[in-house]
Image: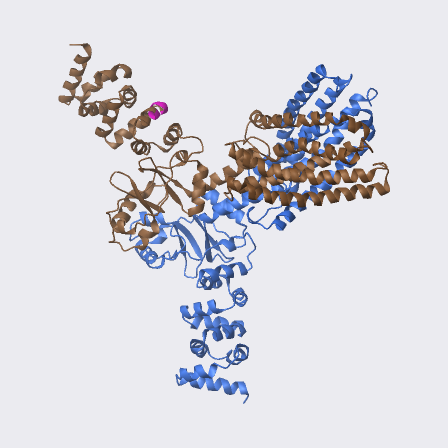
Chain colours: A brown, B blue
Amino acid sequence: MSANTQIKQEITALIDRHDFAKLKKFLEPWQPMDLAPIIADLPVGELAALFRVSPRELAAATFTYMPAESQKKMLYVLTQDQVAALLNALPPDDRTAFLHKLPLDLAMQLLAMLSPGERQVAQSLLAYPEHSVGRMMTLDFVAVRPEWTVRESLDYIREHGYDRETLNIIFVVDEDGHLLDDIRVRRLLLSPLDRPVRELLDGNFTMLSPVDDREKALEIFRKFDRVALPVTDEYRKLIGIVTVDDMLDVASAEATEDIQKLGGSEALDEPYTTIALHKMVKKRASWLVVLFLGELLTATAMSFFEGEIQKAVVLALFVPLVISSGGNAGSQAATLVIRALALGEFRLGDWWRVMRRELAAGLALGLILGTIGFLRIALWAQFSHIYGDHWPLVAVTVGVSLVGVVLWGSLMGSMLPLILKRLGFDPATSSAPFVATLVDVTGLIIYFSVAYAFMHGVLL
Amino acid sequence: MSANTQIKQEITALIDRHDFAKLKKFLEPWQPMDLAPIIADLPVGELAALFRVSPRELAAATFTYMPAESQKKMLYVLTQDQVAALLNALPPDDRTAFLHKLPLDLAMQLLAMLSPGERQVAQSLLAYPEHSVGRMMTLDFVAVRPEWTVRESLDYIREHGYDRETLNIIFVVDEDGHLLDDIRVRRLLLSPLDRPVRELLDGNFTMLSPVDDREKALEIFRKFDRVALPVTDEYRKLIGIVTVDDMLDVASAEATEDIQKLGGSEALDEPYTTIALHKMVKKRASWLVVLFLGELLTATAMSFFEGEIQKAVVLALFVPLVISSGGNAGSQAATLVIRALALGEFRLGDWWRVMRRELAAGLALGLILGTIGFLRIALWAQFSHIYGDHWPLVAVTVGVSLVGVVLWGSLMGSMLPLILKRLGFDPATSSAPFVATLVDVTGLIIYFSVAYAFMHGVLL
């Protein structure tokens, strides 16, 4: 007879004699990791008795060392209060590991027993991705059964509803917890008290999965005007709900993220006023450096035209004007297209429609700016000799370049977000500064090519 | 005896004899504007009888020609159905004029009698400003009285709630319709049935005014996690409610507006895909032209340095690089500050804190870009003679300019939104392109001044 068997027999004997005081004393000196393997194969009834008399920390720690099968058995023999105490005493990571071994709906039931603080930790540890529905769902919903009457349901709600997140939507589940329907509480309130819940169902409901992105949830809330949506596991078991008040925060956070990206920075993920300075500099520097490296190409491009500039310095004067006009047009187009994409106003397949619009808009905008540019130079030349004798050539070059650059900027700005999305990136990455940088480089080439075409043999 | 008196006597006689068939025939040939002054001072009882037998259009039209006092009297003697029929038959503008003469809470009660379509028209005509709470409020709420029990309230809701927008929040009003409190329906559901509503009140509620901006409503919803908020008139009478589902649309619309402005365009106010091309071009052109006019200053600034460029063409090569780095840094800072302002993360009074942050961040970012710029030129010069013998001067000029321009861009970008807000403009007006344009002009001055300082006597 091994030492372990001896110990087991002693424990069994103490339990049989209901000598819990002595049992308690007997357990006290044990280390959890030593005790676990010894008691693992005791009958569950005895295990439960053992756990009931153990100090809470010992019980919790021992629990974590037990094989998964024994752990599951324990859940069924302990009272709800005992399970709650046990779970709350588990270290978060062990708890997560344990919950992960359970079917999702059982895990959710256990999560609901945790204190709110512990639960939040557990939920984020349950490996739901950041910004997922699983991270924001609450477990405090009210579920009724289809065979109950309206009166029974209202009584149930009166008894159990006090700590639930919302009573505006009542969920209807079968005996295994599968979601059958959700009904607005108004249906209960407006129906005769003796009608069975079954007759109130319209089978019209939308489910979320815990791994859905919060943006998807937002879209559905917006579309269906609901105040709460059910979250179900892969077997359609109800595991939680998401409420609309969280959606207002999501809407705001998503807009912030898009806006910050559009401004040419990584999303800060923290309030501007409280984020640590070095973190903010890091997030801003990464994009600024990328843009800077891109912008270095302008120096390279310019160096190709050094000869032209040497011959006609007047050309250099309009470089900033021409390239930033293209950048501005591009920023506009990119922002409009990115927002329209985010709102689901069109799909990638509609790119040709967008391109046609931007061709027309870009041409119109280019003609407006080109005309102003031409007139400005023509007018100035009447009062000053700054543009030389060949000012008409300068005016035409700047005017025509502006048409080309603005048109090109509008096309780049509108198509880049679509291309990025097609490649699986966030379209908001093609921020205003990003588009402006790209258009700067190409704008230079357009400008000097136009200049060459018009001035060749005269100034160049 | 005047003709009018004679006609009045005839009508009175017919009503007295209950000869409604003959009365109907007698009224048929009349024009509303002729009939109105004649019957205006009849006793209200007779007026009501007259309206009951008149064809609906005649009654409605006649009503619009009656003095306000008589109109008001009519409301009290007609049945609710008759009032509803009368109101629905009124032309929208006359109806608005009429409603405007009434106390707001009475006007709202009448609005509630209109068909949904007519009501929407009436609500927008009631002169609530665009984007105001008044335009989005609904009149279909449930109000109970404090002296009722929970059971009476639930019975009342069961009877009257079917066509109400939400039953999630129940409003409690006194006999004159003054708002006393709002309670979540859960409080009714969770309370003993014989408890008076008075005992459920916590006096904890927030009211909106119909002239409040929808953005204010959004803020309150976000803060208090409510699903519906009451709208009251200046006497605290409940006139309508706003529900959270509309807020998701408001949040989205407000973000769209901000994003489009940040992209350097007017807010489109219509979806990108469906707005008429000429409208979109107009909204985009206005800002592009403003930016272009600003950008024209770069040509002016450059012309001041024409001599320097002539002497050292190499300077021109780095103009786009230097000024757009400043623009990018400015866009970043502006976007972050505008969003933080929109989210209420700080106030105008905190400008000094923001400025200190941007001083530090701008300096750090400038040093990073300046170093890269310096190294790029130094490295290139080892392999190419493009920057001439004085490449170290060029490298130092570009590096130092970058520090100055990026720092300056960050400061401008962060302070401009605050200045705009202080002057009463929308901070989002200081869009990325707007800041970039401003920084372009000043960036040129910084760049050439630095160049002059370092190259004076050598290259310049």
Position of residue A433 relative to residue B37, above or below, is above
User: From this viewpoint, is residue B152 visible?
Assistant: yes
Which stretch appears magenta?
A92-96
Looking at the rendering, which quadrant does residue A282 occupy? top right
Q: Position of residue A159 (x, y in %)?
A: 28, 44
Please tell me which residue lies in front, A360 or A323: A360
For the point 80% across and 27% down, which residue is it? A310
Q: Is residue A142 left or right of A351 when viewed as pictured? A: left
Predominant secondary structure in magenta? helix
Q: Position of residue A117 (x, y in %)?
A: 38, 31
Please tell me which residue lies in front, A16 or A308: A308
Image quarter of the N terminus of chain B: bottom right
User: From this viewpoint, is residue B332 visible?
Assistant: no
Q: Is residue A93 magenta?
A: yes
For the point 79% across and 34% down, which residue is it? A455
Kindly give the residue lying farthest to the bottom in the view shown. B1
Q: Is residue B175 left or right of B134 when viewed as pictured? A: left
Please tell me which residue lies in front, B297 or B12: B297
For the point 51% across and 81% down, which residue is it? B30
Kindly give the residue lying farthest to the left in the view shown. A17
Q: Position of residue A145 (x, y in %)?
A: 26, 44
Q: Is residue B293 magenta?
A: no
Position of residue B50 relative to residue B440, above or below, is below
Image quarter of the C terminus of chain B: top right
